[in-house]
Image (cartoon, coloured by chain):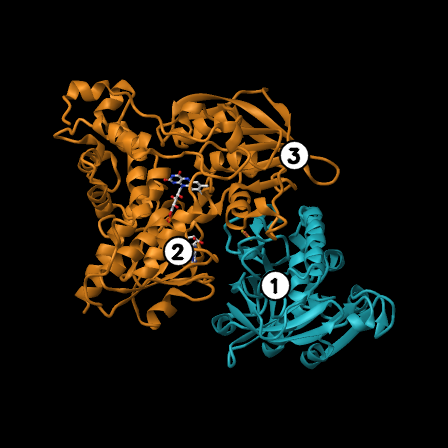
């Protein structure tokens, strides 16, 4: 059981949870994630560790309501328990002094990019962050990102805040201007990560993406999370979640991420039904 | 009642009653039903009480088989249970999952006539009787040693070592990555073959012995072995199994609809996906299912799939049925349940529809040539024999390999062939003093009973090790 120490809504359908998990908090490194299971009947889903504080033994999770489980998370309150939290999982991000690093965060991917940006800054890199959201009120962690960046750009699809356009635009301009970029890290929706990979490929800029395929155990036991990287099949939960963007087979990844979509829709319907009947499994909705 | 050997040999072997196939494929309830007391007694009477019991040689943990069979005949089931439990702490599990036909029953003198004593079914009978009437109860009879021992993994090897060590007075903590203890017994082997209730009872009897379970801990990530030593554990037993599923590396293996048996079985067994959407985890199972492989995992996957309602389920195996490593009973049960066997056949590619889902399996016919290092005849492809079968679900069950996480995060361990940990077979100690290993991680048989046997051996050497070091 892991207690939720703090829960708030960062943006519509995007939730912030600080969870008591002292052992994970002392071991977590940027780029790693946890697998959680909400209750006895719950599924296991991966969530990025957005922050950790070993002094109080807490980890921070940022959750966007997408499927059945994340919709149940939305209903949790401070003081509720999460039945199982396993982590930290996955290989930590490579953190060293590369020089200038451009970090791109799309949507709630910003939550995942933040701890990496922070660590890269501490390692002495010059940090250029480009963060984006569909519209102003969906943008999360702006202040935190700004604080760790030497240069900071905000993009919104509709131009309601910052510049209008996709996060890839400023990166394209920087490359065109011939600025020295030693590494790019992109975390966000698949089409965004793929576009970044295509953009940097001809310029040979080392580019890292963090993949979030379907996972079950998160320990390397099921192979549900397999992705093709170069010639090899990799298990994202143990070999990743970060991979060389230029080697990732995005077509396959996109197809595989649809494998359980129909079930997910059914699941969401069912959860909503449960909510209407106020028969939410124990430990999910408040008291 | 005393029978002459001739009279004993006249009694035919009693088949193990089972649910009728047409009913059982509609549910996950246990298939084999077990003997009643009368049948058990009659079956036990078939034992000739050989002076030199070869069956015992066939048992990886050398249970005194004639001894416990004799007690069944005498009606002393509690004594029979105590005899079995001297060397086997999980008999209700082993009675259900051991490959008796290649172990004890193969060596039974009556096997020559094809009718060995049903030792497995009798072990199961005794163990179930013992559980039902709580005849034997493990307890700690010695005083606490003051030593803390860590066990990594809660499969049969870990559970056995933990129970044995606890009974010797040590404070044992099991660290398990998953949210439920049991290893393959809970995530792999299906309910209809091994009811999870039995595993839970074994776990609860360990709790009674004072064993602590620390679930949701992936050793190597959540905690390292060195941290365990630093936290005051005097020895560590590694029993993380060999759980990484293997794939064949053929085109189309990452298409939608293709998964490992571990994923498929974990979704259904551990996560209860057959109860979706009451349970949150889904499992995909289409109309035409191909399961690749011929071991227990393949049979379990095929029979599990069958229960999810497809039109056809195939087992695709590259050798002939005779070479299949699965337990005989599982092969028979699978056939009774309508699973179609495509032997001497190997998939070479999977073809997809326009949406990235598997639609066809391309296979090649095989023939058997010379025996390979495993002693089984090696399958070789028949040129130009390719053919295609429409399938929308493929479950790959061709074996598993070890996870290198612990080795990578722990100094001083040595890896032998295929990623197995190198251990001294006498003691199960690895190349780093204080760290012991057993079960699938240490290679060997890859059976529940072998894992259990190694867990027991390791427990005894850990006991000696920690006491010697004061
Ligand atoms: C589907 C299937 C059917 C089978 N059927 C039979 C059968 O009928 N008869 C038979 O005799 N054998 C059968 N086997 C084989 C048998 O189950 C195994 O040989 C046996 O379970 C091995 O036991 P173990 O204790 O070594 O490991 P496992 O049972 O594999 O347990 C290992 C445990 O360790 C945990 N773990 C792994 N890494 C870590 C870590 N780093 N930190 C913490 N925990 C960790 C895992 O989560 C797991 O719970 C079957 C196997 C499968 C997959
Ligand atoms: S999630 Fe199961 S192997 Fe990665």
**C-alpha gap between disc 2 and disc 1:** 24 Å
Quadrant (top left/top right/bottom left/bottom right) for the C terminus of chain B? bottom left
- Residue A97 position within the rendered picture, expressed as x and y whole percent measured from the top left: 59, 73
Rendered orange, the chain in question is: B
Q: At 29% across and 50% down in the image, what residue appears?
A: B134
Q: At 50% across and 70% down in the image, what residue appears?
A: A24
Q: Mark 2 points at which residue?
A: B153
Q: Mark 3 points at which residue?
A: B392
Q: Mark 1 lies on which chain?
A: A
The answer, for residue B76, to whether it is visible in the render is yes
In this rendering, the answer to whether B376 lies above or below B222 is above
**C-alpha gap between disc 3 and disc 2:** 35 Å
Q: Is residue A88 rendered to the left or right of residue B415?
A: right
Q: Mark 1 points at which residue?
A: A47
Q: At 30% across and 42% down in the image, what residue appears?
A: B129
In this rendering, the answer to whether A264 lies above or below A1 is above
In which quarter of the view is residue A200 placed?
A: bottom right
Quadrant (top left/top right/bottom left/bottom right) for the N terminus of chain B? top left
């Amino acid at each position: 059981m892991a207690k939720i120490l703090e829960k708030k809504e960062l943006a519509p359908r995007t939730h912030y949870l600080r969870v008591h998990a002292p052992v994970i908090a002392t071991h977590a490194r940027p780029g790693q994630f946890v697998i959680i299971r909400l209750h006895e009947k719950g599924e296991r889903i991966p969530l990025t560790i957005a922050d950790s504080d070993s002094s109080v033994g807490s980890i921070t999770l940022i959750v966007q309501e997408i499927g059945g489980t994340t919709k149940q998370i939305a209903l949790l309150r401070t003081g509720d328990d999460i039945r199982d939290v396993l982590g930290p999982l996955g290989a930590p991000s490579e953190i060293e002094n590369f020089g200038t690093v451009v970090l791109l965060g799309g949507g709630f991917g910003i939550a995942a990019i933040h701890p990496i940006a922070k660590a890269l800054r501490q390692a002495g890199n010059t940090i250029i962050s480009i963060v984006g959201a569909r519209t102003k009120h969906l943008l999360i962690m702006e202040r935190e990102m700004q604080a760790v960046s030497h240069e900071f750009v905000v993009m919104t699809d509709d131009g309601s805040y910052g510049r209008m356009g996709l996060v890839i635009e400023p990166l394209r301009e920087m490359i065109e201007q011939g600025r020295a970029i030693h590494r790019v890290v992109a975390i966000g929706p698949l089409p965004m990560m793929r576009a970044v990979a295509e953009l940097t490929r001809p310029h040979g800029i080392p580019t890292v993406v963090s993949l979030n395929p379907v996972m079950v155990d998160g320990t390397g036991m099921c192979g549900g999370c397999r992705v093709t990287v170069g010639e090899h099949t990799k298990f994202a939960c143990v070999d990743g979640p970060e991979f060389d963007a230029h080697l990732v087979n995005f077509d396959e990844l996109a197809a595989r991420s649809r494998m359980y979509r129909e079930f997910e829709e059914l699941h969401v319907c069912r959860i909503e039904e449960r909510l209407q009947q106020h028969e939410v499994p124990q430990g999910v909705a408040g008291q | 009642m005393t029978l002459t050997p001739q009279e004993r040999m006249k009694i035919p072997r009693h088949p193990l009653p089972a649910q009728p196939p047409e009913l059982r494929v509609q549910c996950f309830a246990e298939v084999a039903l077990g003997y009643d007391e009368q049948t058990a007694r009659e079956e036990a009477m078939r034992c000739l009480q050989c002076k030199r019991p070869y069956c015992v040689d066939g048992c990886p943990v050398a249970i005194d088989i004639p001894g416990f069979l004799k007690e069944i005949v005498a009606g002393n089931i509690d004594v029979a249970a105590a005899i079995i439990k001297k060397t086997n702490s999980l008999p209700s599990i082993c009675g259900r999952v051991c490959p008796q036909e290649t172990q004890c029953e193969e060596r039974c003198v009556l096997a020559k006539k094809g009718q060995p004593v049903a030792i497995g079914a009798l072990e199961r009978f005794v163990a179930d009787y013992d559980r039902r009437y709580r005849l034997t109860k493990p307890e700690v009879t010695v005083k606490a040693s003051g030593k803390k021992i860590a066990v990594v993994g809660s499969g049969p090897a870990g559970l056995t070592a933990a129970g044995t060590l606890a009974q010797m007075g040590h404070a044992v903590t099991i660290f398990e990555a998953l949210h439920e203890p049991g290893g393959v017994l809970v995530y792999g082997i299906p309910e209809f073959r091994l009811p999870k209730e039995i595993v839970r009872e074994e776990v609860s009897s360990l709790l009674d012995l004072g064993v602590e379970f620390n679930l949701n801990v992936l050793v190597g990530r959540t905690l390292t072995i060195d941290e365990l030593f630093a936290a005051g554990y005097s020895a560590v037993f590694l029993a993380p199994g060999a759980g990484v599923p293997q794939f064949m590396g053929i085109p189309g293996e990452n298409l939608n609809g293709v998964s490992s048996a571990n994923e498929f079985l974990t979704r259904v067994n551990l996560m209860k996906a057959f109860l979706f959407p009451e349970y949150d985890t889904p499992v995909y199972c289409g109309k035409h299912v191909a399961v690749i492989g011929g071991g227990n995992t393949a049979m379990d996957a095929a029979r599990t799939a069958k229960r999810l309602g497809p039109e056809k389920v195939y087992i695709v195996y590259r050798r002939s049925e005779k070479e299949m490593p699965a337990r005989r009973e599982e092969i028979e049960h699978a056939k009774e349940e309508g699973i179609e066997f495509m032997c001497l056949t190997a998939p070479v590619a999977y073809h997809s529809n326009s949406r990235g889902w598997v639609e066809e399996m391309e296979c090649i016919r095989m023939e058997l040539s010379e025996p390979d290092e495993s002693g089984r005849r090696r399958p070789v492809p028949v040129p130009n024999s390719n053919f295609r079968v429409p399938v929308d679900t493929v479950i790959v069950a061709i074996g598993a390999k070890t996870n290198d996480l612990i080795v990578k995060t722990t100094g001083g361990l040595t890896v032998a062939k295929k990623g197995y940990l190198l251990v001294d077979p006498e003691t199960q100690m690895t190349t780093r003093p204080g760290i012991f290993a057993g079960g699938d991680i240490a290679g060997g048989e890859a059976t529940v009973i072998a894992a259990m046997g190694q867990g027991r051996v390791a427990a005894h050497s850990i006991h000696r090790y920690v006491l010697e070091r004061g």
